[in-house]
Amino acid sequence: MANHKEHLLYGAAAGAAVYLIDYNLSGREFSVAEFIGAALSGLVAAKLPDLIEPAVHPNHRSTFHSVTFSTTALPVAWQWTRGKREEHLKLADKYTSLAAQAVSEQEKTMWRQKAFWHKVAAGVLLGMVPGYASHLLADALTPKSLPLFG
Ligand SMILES: [Zn+2]
């Protein structure tokens, strides 16, 4: 059974990996803010299944660990987070160009900070579902595997 630390590690790796794939496909500039955001949210999201259904007995895996949940709710959540991510990326781009046009250092810094936080948010949104999914995948590969419904 994947232990707590392994789940966190897999979650962070899943978030980071999905960011790297997205970065390669999108042609956007590499963003440390997005990368860190995706890895951290992957790590946190990988804790969720066992926070909702704590491993207090061998059959703790229920609805939120189920095959049905992974194949219905996760794709919906993925679509939603992708949409929200696009909104944050657009805002980040807008503030980045405003920073480039800024007349004072103070104004430039303000727009850059706004762009930075929207990139963090875009990364966080990207890493959530892969982090959660990494937990279920790790659990699925154990002898107990995942319940069909819960
Ligand atoms: Zn679990």
Image (cartoon, helix red, strand yellow):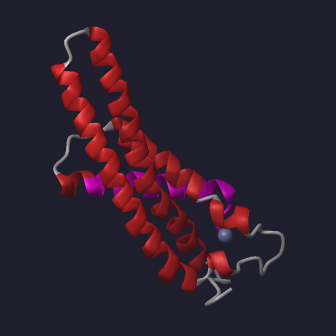
| In front of the other: 71 or 115 | 115
Q: Is residue 19 visible?
A: no
Picture quarter with ligand 1:
bottom right
Q: Position of residue 145 (x, y in %)?
A: 62, 83
| In front of the other: 61 or 145 | 61
Q: Main SS type for the magenta part?
A: helix
Q: Quadrant of the N terminus?
A: bottom right
Q: Quadrant of the C terminus?
A: bottom right
Identify whether 130 is placed above or below 70: above
| In front of the other: 26 or 15 | 26
Q: Is residue 104 visible?
A: yes
Q: Residue at x 43, y 53 (%)?
A: 125
Corner quadrant of residue 108: top left
Position of 130 compared to 119: left or right?
right
| In front of the other: 19 or 118 | 118
**Magenta residue check for 115:** no
Identify whether 65 is placed above or below 126: below
**Magenta residue check for 17:** yes
Q: Position of residue 53 (x, y in %)?
A: 74, 70
Q: Residue at x 68, y 61 (%)?
A: 3
Numbered label tally: 0
Identify whether 144 is placed above or below 138: below
Corner quadrant of residue 79: bottom left
Position of 125 compared to 145: left or right?
left
Q: Residue at x 51, y 60 (%)?
A: 131
Q: Position of residue 147 (x, y in %)?
A: 65, 87
What residue occupies the far right of the structure in this picture?
56
> What residue range appears in magenta?
1-22
Q: Residue at x 51, y 46 (%)?
A: 40
Q: Position of residue 90 (x, y in %)?
A: 26, 45
